[in-house]
Amino acid sequence: MGNPVNVMLAERLRSLPDIMARMGGKCAFEFKYDGIRVQAHIRKGPGGFVRLFSRRLEDMTSNFPDIGAALLAQLKGKEAIVEGECVAYDPSTGTLQPFQNVTHRRKKHGMEQAVEDVPVRIFLFDMLYRDGEDLTFKPYSYRRMMLESSFADDSSGAYDRIGYTERAVVGSAEGAQEFFDRAVASRCEGIMAKSLAEDSVYRAGSRGFIWIKYKKDYTQALVDSFDLTVVGAFYGMGKRAGKYGALLMAAYDPDTGRFGTACKLGTGFDDAFLDSLPGMLERFRSEGKPGSLDAEMEPDVWFLPGLVLEVTAADISLSPIHTAARGYVNGESGLGLRFPRFTGRVRDDKTPEQCTTAAEIAEFYRMQEERGER
């Protein structure tokens, strides 16, 4: 209790029928909310406490004092570790608000005003521990049952801060599409599909097809959004003279523990972001190419993997220059994102090791090729 656990991660697939096939025709679907993932450690009684951690295992207790108070008040047992998504919402309508709203809660100062200005709810989706029982080795269905029996209803409304992720067991592609449409209509990012098998344990720090995410982006023309880490910068020219004009971005390969470059990113930046870049990157500056990086391109400035940005792209292509997923498709080429663009979202809730993986990029490339053959 009080020591954060590395969070379980999800894989991605390109279509709902692919997800249903991978899950054996039946699985649980949950809304995927557009907020900040939080792991809560709650202990009641003498010496009790609440501590909230980000997916990077940073202490965020001071950012969500209202959520902490609600969890402590409504927990039925003595102690628990649970996970949820903190999402900004409009109390008068119950409408969920965009991710940018909840990021105001990451302030270091003026938190009392931020709590008043940005109401937040936590949508709980997993339970790792309760009253002496380690639940991480239990299947998903058991953990969910324990979660839903562990918090009292708040009939008074004094702590209207806790909910559970919307959930349904789905056994058909039609049911999957209906649930997905409902999630998007509710202003969610998409859905999470979760295995109902006996081996659906909580795999801390691991990514696997026990959980599969599917976002509304996947139904659009762009391939998807990718979380990549900055490993280099190129000085700008013209209007960007004296600033960093483009960034060298990399993906992580957990099989090798190394990073490979995936694109040179130069679009999607506004002036304010470019002005703030040196300050964000300075602590990661490196005198030479980082030892954990494979790169053919030579930027003007090298950086240790640290800052993570969300990037979109038109598609993925074989690349003689970029090294991400090299050897996954053929022995000579890596994979590069074509026409990459910064979405404006800094993923300070993710570590470089939680970036999009080389295997994920390769999987999207294969699915892209399959679509082209049809």
Image (spheres, helix red, strand yellow):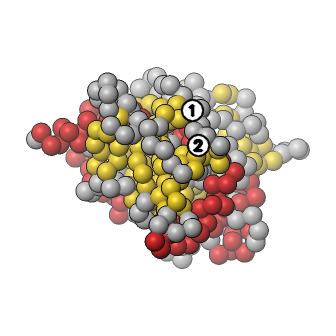
Amino acid at the residue labelled 1: Ser
Residue identifier under label 2: 305
- Residue 145 visible from this viewpoint: no
Q: Secondary structure at mark 2?
A: loop
Picture coordinates of residue 316, whole percent (x, y): 30, 45
Q: Are marks 2 and 1 in contact (CB under 8 Å)?
A: yes
Q: Is residue 83 above or below residue 161?
A: above
Q: Is residue 273 left or right of residue 73?
A: left
Q: Quadrant of residue 134?
A: top right
Q: Secondary structure at mark 1?
A: loop
Residue at mark 2 to residue at mark 1: CA–CA distance: 9 Å
Q: Is residue 296 above or below residue 308?
A: above
Q: As drawn, which residue projects farthest toward the left?
A: 374
Amino acid at the residue labelled 2: Pro
Q: Residue at x 52, y 60 (%)?
A: 235
Q: Quadrant of residue 119?
A: bottom right
